[in-house]
Image: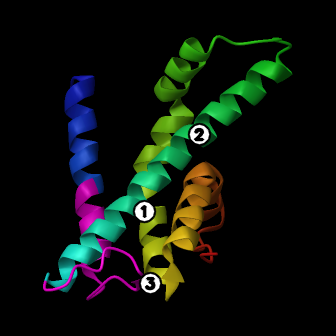
Amino acid sequence: MKRTTISTVLCLIGAAIFYFFAAQKSGAEIRGAFEIPGAPSYVSTILMASLGYITMVIGVALGSLYRLLIQKKSAGQQGAKWSTAISEAFRSLDFQIGIVGSPLIFGLLWQGISDLGTAQYLVIALQNGFTVHAVLGRIVESGEQPAVT
């Protein structure tokens, strides 16, 4: 199969997993987040979940870039061109593993939140995105589900 077909299928599966977790809550339980007077509660829930998931994907990208730069430094490289490093990070297996695993980690985060402020929710989403590779490694190695912080 072509790479674009595989990517499309993975994105659709991720979107389905994301929607499954977001639909489990009847309303956004995050204080002050997308409270739209007169709008159905699922609108604010999907908007808040989307914001959190996008923040998590940014964390996945930053984490992949960070680990790539650390790897280059360990190999003795003294500098890196930003455009090349970003391109390498987005094509890395580390980034792809993070993207594939991010719906699961987001689901754990989404189900574990209760009465957080928007800023706390976004920080937790960014942090979990940054460390999604490590969290997935623990799930696979131990067979246990990690606690959501």
**Label annotation for residue 31:** 3
Nearest to N terminus: mark 2 or mark 3: 3
Q: Viewer-proximal residue, 91 or 144?
A: 91
The residue under the point 52% across, 32% down is: 93
Q: Secondary structure at mark 1?
A: helix
Disc 2 versus disc 3: distance between alpha carbons? 27 Å
Screen quadrant of the C terminus: bottom right
Query: In the visual, does 9 lie left or right of 101?
Result: left
Q: Residue 45: tell me if it is visible.
A: yes
Q: Viewer-proximal residue, 135 or 119?
A: 119
Q: Position of residue 74 (x, y in %)?
A: 84, 23
Residue 97 vertical placement versus 56 (above, below): above
Disc 2 versus disc 1: distance between alpha carbons? 15 Å
Q: Position of residue 52 (x, y in %)?
A: 42, 62
**Label annotation for residue 52:** 1
Quarter residue 14 falls in: bottom left
Q: Position of residue 45 (x, y in %)?
A: 28, 76
Nearest to N terminus: mark 2 or mark 1: 1
* Span highlighted in magenta in the image: 15-38
Screen quadrant of the N terminus: top left
Instruction: Please give the residue where the numbered disc 2 appears in the rendered image.
Output: 62
